[in-house]
Image: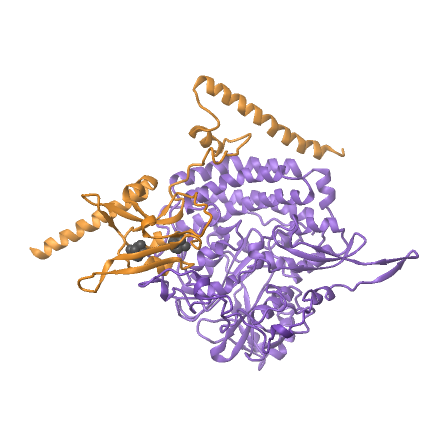
Chain colours: A purple, B orange
Amino acid sequence: MTTPASVSTVDLAARFPGIVSADSRPGYSGWIINADKLIEVATAIRDEFGYDLLSSVTGVDYPADGKMEVVYHAFKTTGGSIFVFKVQMPRDDPVVSSLVPVWKGAELQEREAWDLLGIKFTNHPDLRRILMWEGFEGHPLRKDWKEPFYEEELKPFKSRWPDGKHTIAEAKNPFRDNVQFPVGFDPEKYTFEDPEQALYTSLRKYQSEDKDGIKTDHILVNMGPQHPSTHGVFRAVVMLDGEDIVSLKPVMGYLHRNHEKIGERNTFLQNMPYTDRLDYFNSMSNNFGYALAVEKLMGIQVAERADYIRVIMAELTRIQNHLIWAGMMLNDLGAMYTPALYAFEERELILDIFEATAGSRMMCNYFRFGGVARDMTEDALRKTRELVHDRLPGKVDEMDRLLTDNEVLVSRLKGMGYLSAEDAINTSMTGPMLRASGVPYDIRRADPYSVYDRFEFDVVSRPEGDMYARYLVRIEEMRQSLKILEQALKQIPAGPILSGKPQYQVKIQPGEAYGRVEAPKGELGYYIVSNGKPNPYRYHVRAPSFINLTSLEMLCVGEKIADFVAILGAVDIVLGELDR
Amino acid sequence: MYGKGLLKGLGVTFVRFFNTYWEDLTWMWRRVTTGEKRYHSAEGIAHRSSKNTRGIFTVQYPEEKLPVPEEFRYIPFLVYDEGADGAKEIRCTSCGICSKVCPPQCIWIVRGTDPSTGRPKPQPAEFYIDADICMNCGFCAEYCPFDAIKMDHDYELASYTRTLLPMEKLMKPASYYAEIRPLNAAREDEARKAKEAAKAAKAEAAAA
Ligand code: SF4
Ligand code: SF4
């Protein structure tokens, strides 16, 4: 195994004495930076130490210490493990300067931290709520915030056993309870203020221009939330000059359910089936990332056979995701359903394997801490071998033949939605988006987890940075996945599938961990803080669908409105994960 | 040549188009010779979900149904053993583990009490599963130490109202369980018998 450059080689405290100190809380790692020097230190982290991609930004609320903390994770696109740094602020006035001037990738994530935790980022270009609606009162991820159907701080709830008289939540907890209003709110005196105004003013202004003696206006178009092309309830507000996009803002949160708050009420194990519902196309990858993070916290090993099964499942997932992506992409381009249905045929066969092994086609809930829930039967293994050896390679080639050289497709994708390597890194792109911009970064290779260091495969990347490159990268990635699958199926050892005993209440030391996997859509990370209790103290999901949208405006400006649909499709988002 | 890629792609769709009819013809031949059918038959469905499927692969639900694998899981049910005179001996001891492990907390159990002593007895007095909330995760079945709650295969539960399943509706016989999950049931039976035998042997050893 290659030993990745570990965090300890960087001594930030020596470089910035008095400004940076090592995080010495037991179980924690990384560096704590004085809030007022953040920009200076972050610039050094990027330019001097080479951590060029800011992966994740999130906050943690510590009411007991009266503190609010912002946690940053960055990595080098040349490989190596993740680098953690933090700033701490007083909880009653959490203000810190925004990192957008250093990494544009912080933009949406800082908005999320403001929305859900109430951390103010000064100098942020557009600090508005992002998942909750404008006018929502409170910051839901703060520890003292309670949801309308609040029952108890932590699960399991006492009302279920031994005296579990069934009640429905609405009956016990009428709507008005726990709904928070602004201080001094009086519905009688309430005057309606259009909450969309802030959104519209954040776009480039309406302008009257003289063009060839004709006065023209920019027009504003709302794409979505109900729009067949937007893959769910996603909305983009677009400012147009004729047909050209001059400015664009993604609007999201229509499917928001505060996955993270639910996760902090759940026990560690109870979160596993909830992760299925993030990117519901790839529940196996979601399980994978979460299991890795918790296993790191627990400090346990994974049974070897289980590790192989995990890889098999994750790679099958990637193949079906990319196939469906190609099909759906063609839908977005107007080639209704033929490629999509071809893709669905293979997907059904892959889901058959999931169903026979995990018990469910989409909501797999298959991973456990230290292994997987049940063994892959001989029958399932045989089916997988058949697919991997006899069917899928041919079908990937068929998709390739069907689409790759198609002149219409090429002319619509080539040169469109361009993103340079620098911009891709700066806006925190990961996954195929990053690799299609010429940065060959794949966590399976750069910071190997599970048993990925045992397999031979190529990291697919293309230098063009356009939509066609994103298409080609995904097609080739399926071939690499098949290559990994072949090796995994050959090497899979016999043995137990769980390193310990099955247990529903796991013992976890206080501390923090960040587990990340190369999900089909990009880096899927889980940041978990434990305080030694059976429930996670903080549970954060670094969702690739969400963060990959940071560059959406960059991709679209200058293109035609009709291409917006294709550009969005090429990013590959899924709303369950985007809105969480 | 411009258009070559298009033609190549059209070639793929043409092969698919051709295969659909070729498939029908081969199955027509099979029907005449061996009596096998492509639609509305077990062999036809198995073929359409095998690696050799080509042509139309749709399963005509609800006329046809894909057989579910043993591990398939849907809303849980409570297993009871059939006693000598048809008495339903519920396996559940109302230990509460399932209700604690359930992620959306949709299991509600009232622990039984012995009316004569007023002390808890190992049987549920009431047992509810709110099927509207259940996320079919299978944890309850996985962590029940008494093999008393298992995941069902019946997925046709559409209803006009909320579905709250009380104990009467949740109880199903062990024979039904063995029918839908034969391998699991056999394995668990064996483990239970081995445990009982070990217990008996221990008791014997203690008595001797
Ligand atoms: S079903 Fe099983 S886990 Fe649930 S209370 Fe009964 S015995 Fe305990
Ligand atoms: S299947 Fe999961 S959600 Fe449903 S009752 Fe069992 S533990 Fe609860």
Residue projecting furthest to the front: A188
Q: Quadrant of ligand 2?
A: bottom left
Q: Residue shown at 57%/24% (left/top)?
A: B21
Quadrant placement of the C terminus of chain A = bottom right
- Count of numbered tags: 0
Query: Can you see residue A504?
Result: no
Q: Residue furthest bottom?
A: A18
Location of residue A301 (image quadrant): bottom left
Compare residues A159 and B186 and report the one nearer the observer: A159
Residue A117, percent across and down?
56, 71
Task: Decide: is A287 above or below B70.
Answer: below
Q: Tell me where residue A97 appears, x and y as whole percent.
A: 64, 75
Q: Residue at x 61, y 43 (%)?
A: A475
| Residue A31 place in picture, x, y as percent | 54, 74
**Residue furthest to the left:** B208
Say which residue appears at 59% left-offset and 65% top-offset: A132
* Residue at 93% from the left image edge and 57% from the top image edge: A213
Residue A560 in view here: yes
The quarter of the displayed image where residue B177 is located: top left
- Residue furthest to the top in view is B33
Q: Position of residue A381 (x, y in %)?
A: 42, 40
